[in-house]
Image (cartoon, rainbow, N blue to C red):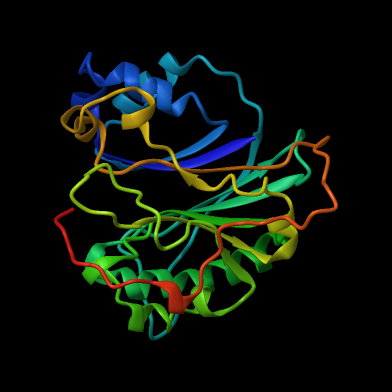
Amino acid sequence: MKIASFNVQRFGVNKISNPDILPVLIKIVSRYDIILILEVVDIKNTAVKDFVKKLNKHDTVKLIDTYQYEDNQVGDEDAFAREPYVLRFACENTKLKDLVLIPVHTMPEDSFKEIDELYDVVIAVKDKWKTENIMILGDFNADGAYLSNRKMKKIRIRTDPIFKWLIADDVDTTANTGNDYTYDRIVVYGDEMLKGIVPKSAKPFNFQVEYGLTEEQALRISDHYPVEVELKSANYKDTAEKDTHSSVSPEKKPEKTKRKK
């Protein structure tokens, strides 16, 4: 089962009404069983509804619960510009029988505070649903001048070894060839969650190369690539060889320069 997060850059009526953009978006999104679409600008929700109708894909998972993180801790209220809307799924065809997804889209100037606060979100989710099958994914803005190496070392979900960062710091998740930033991330909680993931499956999907687009064409779709990961199917055959994943540590993060979002 494939899961992804995709910052589609102002996803709304104008984007899905464009005949050059819509077919590519459909191809990208259709790759996944679950996809979190970020940066939706659609007050009436018409673009989302129309887009879902065009996908024509049957559900392979069941959404069983949701949770709007309240972000009201005393002394640390409103840490998030966009409070995480947490999703819990029942997965019948994977080794993991349930899965919690925590979507992330930080404000660039507040990325340090918001990413650190995700630690508290995970604790709240664990207490609420009594599960440790938790995945955090989205646009962290975790690179360049938005988040220095020094600050990264102070983030709890980065320094606590129970959190596994699956997108390495040297991986480009942006469609702009003028930079190589790693804004988009996938982080999982604990070894059991990690064991449920197909090794080396976490990566960005370079739709520009895959579909033979120019950089200009790609940027009309988004300035980000989707980041994706695959869960092991129920009949996946684990080998004796130790699973390998692209994990990172604070010391590996290179300093990079800021670009406009």
Percent x, y for residue 67? Answer: 54, 54
Q: Is residue 30 left or right of residue 261?
A: right
Q: Residue at coordinates 60% horizontally, 71% vertically from top-left?
A: 123
Percent x, y for residue 138? Answer: 42, 52
Q: Residue at coordinates 26% horizontally, 37% vertically from top-left?
A: 222
Q: Quadrant of residue 44?
A: top left
Looking at the image, which is closer to me, 188 or 73? 188
Q: Is residue 22 left or right of residue 253?
A: left
Q: Quadrant of residue 12?
A: top left
Asked if residue 46 is positioned above or below residue 133 in the image, the reply reads above
Q: Is residue 69 left or right of residue 212?
A: right
Percent x, y for residue 10? Answer: 23, 39
Q: Quadrant of residue 128?
A: bottom right
Q: Residue at coordinates 67% horizontally, 68% vertically from top-left?
A: 127
Quarter holding the N terminus is top right
Asked if residue 196 is positioned above or below residue 159 in the image, the reply reads above
Q: Residue at coordinates 55% horizontally, 40% vertically from top-left?
A: 3
